[in-house]
Amino acid sequence: MILASLFAAMAASITVPCGLFTLRVDSLAPGVYAAYQPEPFPSMFYLEGNATIVVNAHDVLVVDAGSSPKAGQCLVSAVKRLTTKPVRFLVNTHWHGDHTLGNQAFVDAFPGVAIIGSTKTRAGEMDDGLKNALDLAHSTASRKAQGAQLIADAQSRPALERDSAIAVFHRYYDHDLDVRQRDYQGIRLAPPDLLVDDELTIQRGDRVIRIFSIGKGDAPGTLVVYLPNERILASADLVVAPIPFGYTQEPLAWRETLARSDSLPFSVLIPGHGNPQRDHGYVRQLMQLVDTVLSESRHAVHAGWPADSVVSKLDAHALARPFTPTPRFNFSSRSIF
């Protein structure tokens, strides 16, 4: 009993160094872990998707696979530090590479693993997802040219935090980008082979794992994973902290998706990026953000402002303040939104 308690305490949080970032793995409930990057935005251009590890009686289910084969290997290493049980299921919540390019590491480490995703997720991985990765693996020239232009533009602005922004640009374009290129060498396609467009429930003893579509977000065919007994929701990029990016052309639809997420009785939400959320407060903050933007936009339109001038009427700093109390960059009123 003492040894079991000691092991549980040790497993409450582990860290796995992974090249450009450190993966932190926190215990959320017996057998359920969040694997995430505590600083979700180490640069403006490099994002590492969160993962969820569910250790069952005889096997493991993992939600999302990391942003590269190396990141996938780091997740595999984290799983093996937690348990000797094999990963039987890997869920791809959506097709974006920062959540799926680690698939091949799981295929290599756990032969026979079933990769679960929607039809649209499979299509996205086989099209733009793979193309984007192979393009970066082939050459960084166009991105470095873009970086040089961004740095030149930043240097011409009398911004409060211009120098720190330029330092971030240099870090990414002078160092991180080359590391990412090396990480993408040898990428192999490993798209979902168990397709779910509506809902799939996996029963493992007393554990219930629901995988289902909850609404529109930043990628078509997004799935969420919900553990009703543990009251844990893995939201994919439908929720991202601390800076949201709904990235949908339909803000009202995203608002509805957030409301459906909020209606689930979760105690912990694992966002697509950022730290786990221990209550509903952040989701409701996102809904308030959308409501405020829509309200102010309607007010500007009703006041007679042309559509292309509405954005300039929004107080971007006021909108951003709840999410970024101390903004990292301050190029203009539209630098965050």
Image (spheres, grey):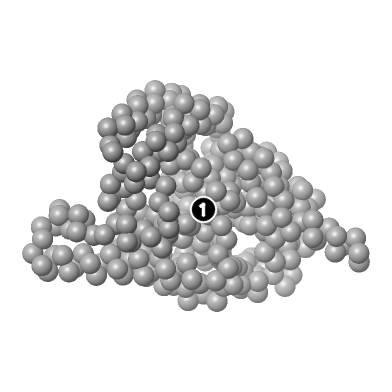
How many labels were placed on the picture?
1
On the image, the x and y values in percent for residue 284 come to 43, 71
Inspect this view and state whether residue 34 appears. Answer: yes
Residue drawn 8% across the image and 64% down it: 304
Kindly state the secondary structure of the residue where label 1 is placed: loop
Q: Which residue is mark 1?
A: 273
Q: Is residue 139 above or below residue 73?
A: above
Give 282 or 203, whichever is nearer the viewer: 282
The residue under the point 42% across, 38% down is 164
Q: Is residue 285 left or right of residue 310?
A: right
Compared to residue 1, the image places residue 40 above or below, namely above
Q: Residue at x 52, y 59 (%)?
A: 271
- Amino acid type, residue under disc 1 in the picture: His
Q: Is residue 233 above or below residue 79?
A: below
Task: Say whether residue 227 is left or right of residue 305.
Answer: right
Quadrant housing residue 11: bottom right
Q: Position of residue 176 (x, y in %)?
A: 51, 31
**Percent of width and height locating residue 249:** 29, 56
- Counting other residues with Cα less than 10 Å from the Cα at mark 1, is it few (<14), some (14-19), or many (20 or more)? many
Residue 318 to residue 229: above or below: above
